[in-house]
Image: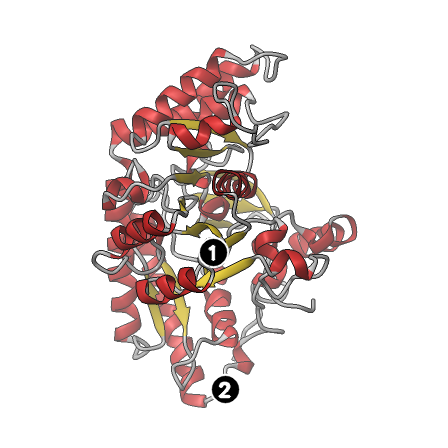
Amino acid sequence: MDTGEFHLPRSRAANERLHSLIPGGAHTYAKGDDQYPENLAPVISHGRGAHVWDIDGNRYVEYGSGLRSVSLGHAHPRVVEAVRRELDRGSNFVRPSVVELEAAERFLATVPTAEMVKFAKNGSDATTAAVRLARAATGRPRVALCADHPFFSVDDWFIGTTPMSAGVPAATTELTVAFPYGDLAATEELLARYEGEVACLVLEPATHTEPPPGYLAGLRELADRHGCVLVFDEMITGLRWSEAGAQGLYGVVPDLSTFGKALGNGFAVSALAGRRELMERGGLRHSGDRVFLLSTTHGAETHSLAAATAVLTTYVEEGVTARLHALGERLAAGVRGAAAAMGVGEHIVVRGRPSNLVFATLDEQGQPSQQYRTLFLRRLLTGGVLAPSFVVSSALSDADIDRTVDVVAEACAVYRKALDAGDPTPWLGGRPVKPVFRRLA
């Protein structure tokens, strides 16, 4: 069954130390060792391009790098050079740096659907700022978020709607309502039910499925008719869908949008962008009540903003989005072909835009299975592929993709054996991986 020949003794010891010092053993739940097969959660030493090395000396082809943030590959020369240039010039001052101006100009030139931008360090702060701004502008209390999208913020207005709602007052959660993606009629019914109460519609403009024809334009019209602020969470779609994000690709302009992840290629930077009339409510050039929009000590850290400027320039000048799509198409075709050849094409399913691929692991009945995910991840890891998703970076080579497909084929052969046996347990090597959002540890 499972040979058990692949061991990570140094990583296993480091994980124990991590758990004793850091709640959850990681700084992001999606990086937790509960997301990986038992005793096969590598602790990373370093990375370069599309490869990472663990502290046990193993090299992996890596996907989903930095939770989708490292889209150009680790230690990208152009980004590193821009960062290094600032390190000796000071990172934070008592007044704005000229780097802030340069980053804002570059961002707004790349995302011309936005008129103003404010930078922060993480996506949660930017998205919560959008919600606060929408509430202030409309005078309304409720937030309507898309129920089909997994994450918007660590703040109470969102976390209270998840199974990990401990510590969030019910009175806060009651102000958040949900609408289904792709269903304009249901959203209109929601807005009618809470007529005059909904401050904003918050959603990712696209995820693992393309928006139905006319859907985003329909939401724009609904928001206008009901007096809501339309907020696009472009943390993932920003740059990966087009240099100007999903709003640039689909031609529907939100009132506010939030960017992060790919924006810094691993450096900490996020952005709230949008219409001047709204954004200026957090500024000094308007006559209404002031909105405490974003005010962060480290939001204007010079080397992170230099990284963002270099990333945006690289995407535009080198056609990175197109490369991500081409690599993703090659990978998706290879994985689907390998799965079909091994007779598991209905069970290992690749979904999403080529630049943002994920995979589903389905059981004998075609239902999503954490056990089969564990089996699949285990075989990928032992084959030198670190892939919680199949989200590509532009540093991948065709040879990396081909190597990945070979490893996937080997994993599919084991998957077929487990399906034939009607029980994947002998191939798991321990407890199954777990979903991030669950009530109990």
The answer to whether residue 80 is seen in the rendering is no
Q: Could you tell me how far apart the alpha carbons at marks 1 and 2 are, in whole angstroms?
A: 41 Å
Residue at the (27%, 54%) spot, across then down: 218
Quadrant location, the C terminus: bottom right
Classify mark 2: helix, strand or loop: loop
Left or right of 92, for residue 411: left
Height in image: 83 above or below 26? Answer: above
Residue at the (73%, 52%) spot, across then down: 23
- The dot on residue 216 is none
Q: Where's residue 205, x and y in %? A: 35, 51
For mark 2, what is the residue? Answer: 423
Residue at the (41%, 85%) spot, across then down: 364
Amino acid at the residue labelled 1: Ala
Marked residue nearer the N-terminal end (1 or 2): 1
Q: Where's residue 73, x and y in %? A: 41, 38
Classify mark 1: helix, strand or loop: strand
